[in-house]
Image (tube, rainbow, N blue to C red):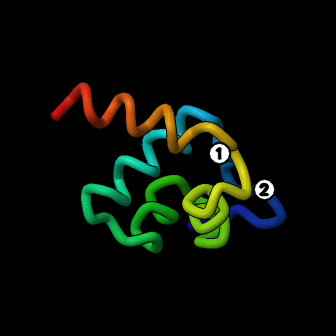
Amino acid sequence: MTTKTNEPSYQLTFNDAVEIHMMLWDGWIQSRIAAKYDVNIGRISEVKNGVTHFGSEAMAKRAYLKSA
């Protein structure tokens, strides 16, 4: 089996951040979300706490309320 080394993991987009907020509200835990996106759990925490992708939480709220 060949393993990938020294390759960067996935970089989250704004749309990913919107989806991550909704996943968190649906009860997903951060480690599972990080695994799904192949990123460090710290990147999920940054999205959750508004450090990156500012405005994604507000957009997620609008989308989440529409789907409810």
Helix, strand or loop status at disc 1: loop
> Hey, what amino acid is under mark 2?
Pro
Residue at image x 79%, y 57%?
7
Q: Quadrant of residue 46?
A: bottom right
**How busy is the neighbourhood of tag 2: few (under 14 within 10 Å), some, or many (20 plus)?**
few
Image coordinates for residue 67, horizontal then vertical, percent: 21, 29
Task: Determine the residue located farthest toward the top in the rendered image.
Answer: 66
Helix, strand or loop status at disc 2: loop
Q: What is the distance, in whole Å, between disc 2 and disc 1 at their CAs?
A: 12 Å
Q: Dividing the image into 4 quarters, which one contains the N terminus?
A: bottom right
Q: Which residue is mark 2?
A: 8
Query: In the depicted view, which residue is nearer to us: 31 or 48?
Result: 48
Left or right: 55 with respect to 67? Answer: right
In the image, residue 8 sits, relative to residue 27, either above or below, namely: above
Labels 2, 1: front one: 1
Residue at image x 43%, y 37%?
60
> Hey, what amino acid is under mark 1?
Leu
The number of numbered discs placed on residues in the rendered structure image is 2
Q: Which residue is mark 1?
A: 12
